[in-house]
Amino acid sequence: MKIKLIGVAIAAAIFSLPTSTRAAAEFGLDHPGAKAVMAVQKSVTADLMKLPGVLGTAVGQGDIEAAALVIYVDQDSPSRADIVRSLPPQIRGVGVKVELTDKFRAFATKPAGATTTVNTKAKQTPPIQLGTSGGWGYDLANGYCCGGTLGGLIQVNGVQFILSNYHVLEADTVSGGNSIVAATGQPIIQPALIDASCNSANSQTVATLVKISALPGANVDAAVAQVTPGMVNASGAILGIGTLSSNTVAATVNKGVKKSGRTTGLTKSSISGLNATVSITYENECAGGTAFTKTFTGQIVIANVGSRFLAGGDSGSLMVENVTTKPRAIGLLYAGSSSTAIANPINEVLTFVGSKLGGTATMVGN
């Protein structure tokens, strides 16, 4: 199985956030308080990330002030206590908060005890809805099979593509465990091998991989597959969510969101951080070795207490606003922990995909 991240906890005795007095108003990066935090964040993040126990920073909700600088610290680092003690409650008037976490890792695996209220793991009758189990047709190596989520439907130059993560569809870069690497033209299946007894005969090909090689170079964990005619609902409907708007919307702190994913199904939460800089570790194949550690910037952070919003295997899920009809896409989920989920901003994803496919990428919707 692919690696997972567990055990994140807010440092309750240090700069803790009293939920009973927390402001619930939404704010974006254009808010004066957020701008002040970003100015400090820009000046200190590079130096903080050089410390062996610091994993990232973000603009988040403050205790009294609207926004604060959130610093993510590796709870297993020998330097953890020294780092936490050295961080002041404020930097140049901006509040500082610490969140202790294991190292951030891409979220494509099957955690024990995961449940779902929507049947996101079953083989569907075509044309399938998305927000479902799926993945690379050869995602089996080292005695394990893997998978993630086929997140949403996009179009470029009139052609429809399934949108998911690089580490769900393209991450096999070595032939060691299965004598094959990911390449354009290979099958993308539903459900994923992990939900098909590791046998592709129990799945169905719904698209073919179009390799765009987002990582490690780009700032998004994205991959696409061209839809096989008749196999995917052309409206882009997502299980439990329905048809989306063709428009997108920017993330704001405290905004309500939802997603449909392979492991936890239809879940809801709220955005807790913006403009995050985080480091994520990736494997080179299913149950393989470490391929690289990627530092992302400008990311979206979502509350994920007890892994109730996002868990292993939900990677590739499309995050949308929590409204009843025609929700707008906000981000592409790809990593997380038992208390934190991370998403690429959807507009950055679409811009990158469009540049690789020679056109303008848009969400399929009304």
Image: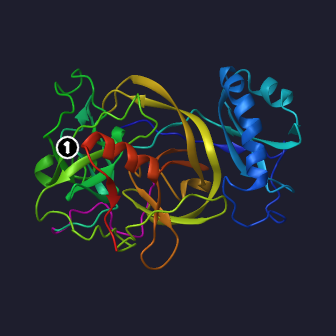
- Quadrant in the picture for the N terminus: top left
Q: Please state if 113 lies on the left or on the right of 27 as rendered.
A: left
- Quadrant in the picture for the C terminus: bottom left
Q: Quadrant of residue 160?
A: bottom left
Q: Secondary structure at mark 1?
A: strand
Q: Position of residue 32 (x, y in %)?
A: 78, 53
Give the image's coloring scheme. rainbow
Q: Position of residue 248 (x, y in %)?
A: 45, 63
Seen at 26% across and 32% down, the residue is 143
**Residue 297 visible (yes or no):** yes
Count of marks placed on residues: 1
Q: At label 1, which amino acid type do we have?
A: Leu
**Residue 110 visible (yes or no):** no
**Residue that sits furthest to the bottom in the current view:** 324
Q: Please state if 297 lies on the left or on the right of 145 as rendered.
A: right
Q: Position of residue 119 (x, y in %)?
A: 33, 67
Seen at 80% across and 47% down, the residue is 12
Instruction: Give the residues in magenta.
Output: 112-126
Q: Quadrant of residue 130?
A: bottom left
Q: Is residue 122 magenta?
A: yes
Q: Is residue 246 magenta?
A: no
For disc 1, the marked residue is: 209
Q: Position of residue 214 (x, y in %)?
A: 36, 35
From the image, give the main secondary structure of the stretch colored magenta: loop
**Above or below for 227 versus 89:** below
Seen at 32% across and 53% down, the residue is 361
